[in-house]
Amino acid sequence: MNGYSKYKEKSIYSMSNGELLLLLFDESIKRLTRAEQSLKEKDYNDFDDCMKRTSRIIRYLIEILNMEYKISWDLKRIYEYLIYDISVVRAGRERRLDEIGRIRHILSELREAFDSASRQVTDTRIPMQREVRG
């Protein structure tokens, strides 16, 4: 593992839950942008890879929901819709290119909402200590 990879891993381990959540949204938005560009360039392998990764991120967002809260049920429905929409885009490719921007917009709005909420709430949990070994 090179120095940059170690640095990146340490910085991820030192992030709060809110920061990690924002990182997931950022990565999914970045992948959708790349998928859109790949589709325009007819690079279908990269397009499929980006869409699969975005779908995996959204599935992970579903997995980490705390279903004890009503809002989690609403978020789950939104995430499931996004997964469905991603599958439609993957199947339709160029015919559904405009849908990528809509998916990205929904994820951007969710990211902004979580960012705003995390700024208003103080995290009082005890941080988990993790050791990074190279």
Image (cartoon, grey):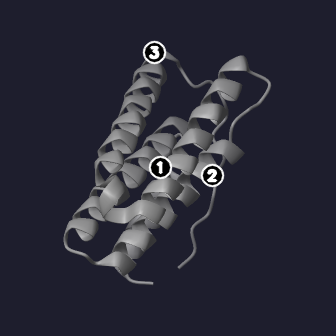
Q: Residue furthest left?
A: 41
Q: Is residue 117 above or below residue 18?
A: above
- The residue closer to the viewer here, 1 or 104, is 104
Give the class, few, some or many, for how many residues have Cα within 10 Å of label 3's Cα (few <14, many ≥20).
few
Given the image, on which type of amino acid does mark 1 rest? Leu
Give the x, y percent position of residue 23. 43, 48
Q: Do the residues labelled 2 and 1 touch (CB within 8 Å)?
A: yes
Residue at figure coordinates x 36%, y 59% from the top left: 31
The answer to whether residue 74 is left or right of residue 117 is right
Along the polypeptide, which appears first: circle 3 or circle 1? 1
Residue on which the image places disc 1 = 24
Q: Residue furthest bottom?
A: 1
Give the class, few, some or many, for how many residues have Cα within 10 Å of label 1's Cα (few <14, many ≥20).
some
Picture quadrant of residue 113? top left
Q: How far apart are marks 3 and 2 (CA)?
A: 24 Å
Residue on which the image places disc 3 = 120
- The residue closer to the viewer here, 92 or 71, is 92
Q: Distance between the residues labelled 2 and 1?
A: 9 Å
**Residue 60's mark?**
2
Given the image, on which type of amino acid does mark 3 rest? Gln
Which secondary structure, mark 2? helix
Along the polypeptide, which appears first: circle 2 or circle 1? 1
